[in-house]
Amino acid sequence: MQEIVQVTMAEFKIMKAPGQIVTLGLGSCIGVCAYDSIVKLGGMLHIMLPNDAMAIGGVVNPAKFANTGVPLLIKELEAQGASRFRIEIKIVGGAHMFSANGQESVFNIGTRNLEAVEEACNFLGLKIVAKSVGGNNGRSVSLDLETGNVYVKTLESGIMNYVLLA
């Protein structure tokens, strides 16, 4: 039986094949899926906010923020045998969940999260190979550690949609 590990908000998990890493209910949050196909090692990060400057009271969970979570995920993957030069990134989420009258919220959290993840990946020299981002619907995501495929599930107008980010 294949192991399934769940990542919750402000958390990351790393795992070798076989198995899956999943996160449920991404809204404005971003799920960062990282995978090295040679060693079949992957990880998923569920970030909530763009940067740790938004931390309240000096309490910082690095997995909560894009600018600290992405480097942490990559560091831990490399420590377990992945190569930064082989790691492919797929990102999911960044929806506009808090809009009113069709207008995006002044906070733009989904957009800001997406920009911060892209910036962190660019800074680390990581290749983003696929995205399922934006819109105003939540998403759930699963990373298959045997193939590196990312499966995205959304509910739009009462219809369940499934997308493969290969």
Image: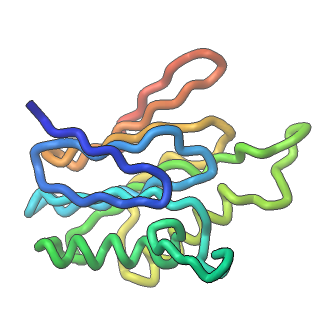
- The vertical placement of 154 against 41, above or below, is above
Along the viewing direction, whichever of 166 and 153 lies nearer the viewer: 153
Residue 133: image location, x then y, percent: 56, 49
Which quadrant of the structure image shows residue 151? top left
Which residue corresponds to the image point at 24% horizontal and 77% vertical from the top-left?
Answer: 84
Along the viewing direction, whichever of 27 and 162 lies nearer the viewer: 27
Which quadrant of the structure image shows residue 87? bottom left
- The vertical placement of 37 against 133, above or below, is below
Answer with left or right where residue 17 lies relative to residue 76.
left
Residue 148: image location, x then y, percent: 22, 49
Name, please, the residue furthest toward the top: 158
Which residue corresponds to the image point at 63% horizontal and 51% vertical from the top-left?
Answer: 28
- The vertical placement of 157 against 54, above or below, is above
Answer with left or right where residue 135 lies relative to residue 3.
right
Which residue corresponds to the image point at 18% horizontal and 56% vertical from the top-left?
Answer: 15
Which residue corresponds to the image point at 71% horizontal and 43% vertical from the top-left?
Answer: 97
Answer with left or right where residue 81 lies relative to residue 44.
left
Residue 8: image location, x then y, percent: 43, 49
Residue 108: image location, x then y, percent: 75, 59
Along the viewing direction, whichever of 61 and 139 lies nearer the viewer: 61
